[in-house]
Image: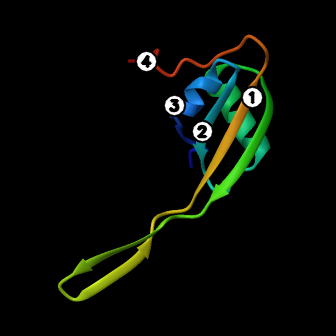
Amino acid sequence: MSILKRPLLTEKLTALAEKGVFAFEVDRKANKIEIKKAIQSKYGVTVEKISTMRTQGKLKSRNTKSGVVTGRTASTKKAIVTLKEGEVIDFYSGI
């Protein structure tokens, strides 16, 4: 089980990256201590603060031959990570 699923790269989070704040989609069962250890070992940075939030999946419906089918997308958990002053994570280095 991988704790870090993917980094979140949006326009708002790209602006926050200049201040040393990054966001990741993480496993729903992971706690802050596990997330901190995973980020520090994978990227070699020092984590100062972690905020987590759980988001509920969106309700979706579509019309099919047999009628309207409703369901929900998967729920996720996000981690907002603040790094030590002067440290950065470069997501584009492997490209």
Looking at the image, which residue is at 55% across and 62% down? Answer: 75
Q: Quadrant of residue 18?
A: top right
Can I make out residue 30 in this image? no
Numbered mark located on residue 82 in the image: 1
In the image, what residue type sits under mark 2? Phe
The vertical placement of 15 against 72, above or below, is above
Estimate the spatial distance between the alpha carbons at disc 4 and disc 3, rounded to whole Å: 20 Å
Numbered mark located on residue 59 in the image: none
- Report the quarter where the C terminus lies: top left
Tag 3 or tag 1, which sits nearer the N-term? 3
Dots 1, 3 in contact, CB < 8 A: no
* Residue 25 screen position, x and y as percent: 57, 44
Q: Which residue is mark 2?
A: 24
Q: Which residue is mark 4?
A: 94
Q: Quadrant of residue 37?
A: top right
Q: Residue furthest left?
A: 65
* Residue 41 screen position, x and y as percent: 67, 26
Q: Which residue is mark 3?
A: 11
Estimate the spatial distance between the alpha carbons at disc 1 and disc 2, rounded to whole Å: 11 Å
Classify mark 4: helix, strand or loop: loop
In the image, what residue type sits under mark 3? Glu
In the image, what residue type sits under mark 1? Thr
Tag 2 or tag 1, which sits nearer the N-term? 2
Q: How many marks?
A: 4
Q: Residue furthest right?
A: 48
Q: Is residue 62 left or right of residue 28?
A: left
* Residue 35 screen position, x and y as percent: 70, 40
Classify mark 2: helix, strand or loop: strand
